[in-house]
């Protein structure tokens, strides 16, 4: 083979290598970009998964019930069951018989327990639809049907029977004393007479 033929073969080999490398470069870049794209897609999902428990923890769960009379009680906890250790602003509104409305009423925490609130006697007798709201950042709302009852007064004490003494019993108390006095006087007279006889003897 002549020198010219050898140069042609070498040139063809170089051209083939160049074409091969140029074709492989985009594939390598695509292979490197695929994990980066997957990581970029996974990042928002991971952030959302972390944000969901945080949002759940910051949300309130309100349990509304009647107090057995004309008031409402509310137990506030975190949605995940943890006790509420801070004071939140709870507001009560209620709709009752014949369209009566109560509220908005600001509720105050009570010393009975953490997260325990009570409205006091704000409802009249009847069935009420009660709503309790808490503003942001611990925003929540709860609704319940409450049966308000009139406060029951304590039962009156039973009357105490008073027995009167019989008419003839008023003067019977001095007879035992009088009898004892007579016995003592008789004994003293007997002793005096006895000593008197001994002296005369």
Image (spheres, grey):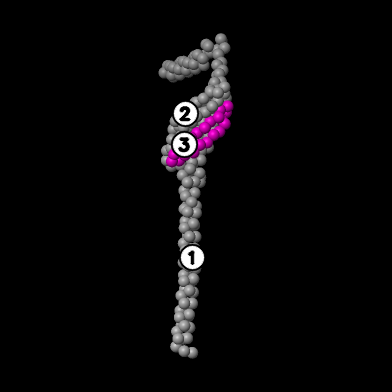
Q: Residue 52's spot in the image, x, y percent?
A: 49, 49
- Is residue 83 placed above or below 110 in the rendered structure? below
> Which residue reaches farthest bottom?
1
The residue positioned 49% from the left and 60% from the top of the image is: 38
The residue positioned 47% from the left and 77% from the top of the image is: 15
Helix, strand or loop for disc 1: helix
The local crowd at label 1, few if under 14, some if 14 to 19, many if 20 or more residues have their Cα within 10 Å, is few
In the rendered structure, the answer to whether residue 145 lies left or right of residue 12 reads right
- Write down the region rendered in magenta: 127-150
* Count of residue discs: 3
Q: Which residue is mark 1?
A: 30
Q: Which residue is mark 3?
A: 134
Question: Label 1, label 2: how many angstroms apart (C-alpha)?
Answer: 62 Å
The local crowd at label 2, few if under 14, some if 14 to 19, many if 20 or more residues have their Cα within 10 Å, is some
Q: Residue 165's spot in the image, x, y percent?
A: 55, 13
Q: Quadrant of the C terminus?
A: top left
């Amino acid at each position: 083979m002549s020198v010219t033929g050898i140069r042609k073969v070498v040139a063809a080999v170089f051209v083939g290598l160049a074409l091969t490398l140029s074709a492989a470069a985009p594939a390598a870049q695509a292979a490197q970009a695929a994990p980066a794209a997957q990581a970029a897609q996974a990042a928002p999902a991971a952030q959302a998964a972390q944000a969901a428990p945080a949002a759940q923890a910051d949300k309130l769960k309100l349990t509304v019930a009647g107090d057995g009379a004309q008031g409402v009680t509310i137990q506030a906890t975190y949605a995940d069951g943890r006790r509420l250790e801070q004071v939140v602003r709870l507001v009560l509104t209620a709709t009752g018989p014949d369209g009566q409305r109560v509220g908005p009423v600001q509720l105050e925490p009570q010393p009975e327990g953490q997260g325990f609130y009570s409205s006091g006697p704000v409802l009249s007798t009847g069935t009420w639809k009660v709503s309790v709201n808490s503003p942001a950042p611990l925003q929540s709302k709860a609704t319940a049907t409450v049966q308000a009852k009139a406060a029951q007064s304590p039962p009156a004490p039973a009357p105490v029977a008073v027995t009167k003494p019989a008419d003839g019993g008023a003067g019977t108390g001095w007879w035992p004393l009088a009898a004892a006095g007579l016995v003592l006087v008789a004994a003293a007279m007997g002793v005096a007479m006895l000593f008197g006889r001994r002296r005369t003897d």
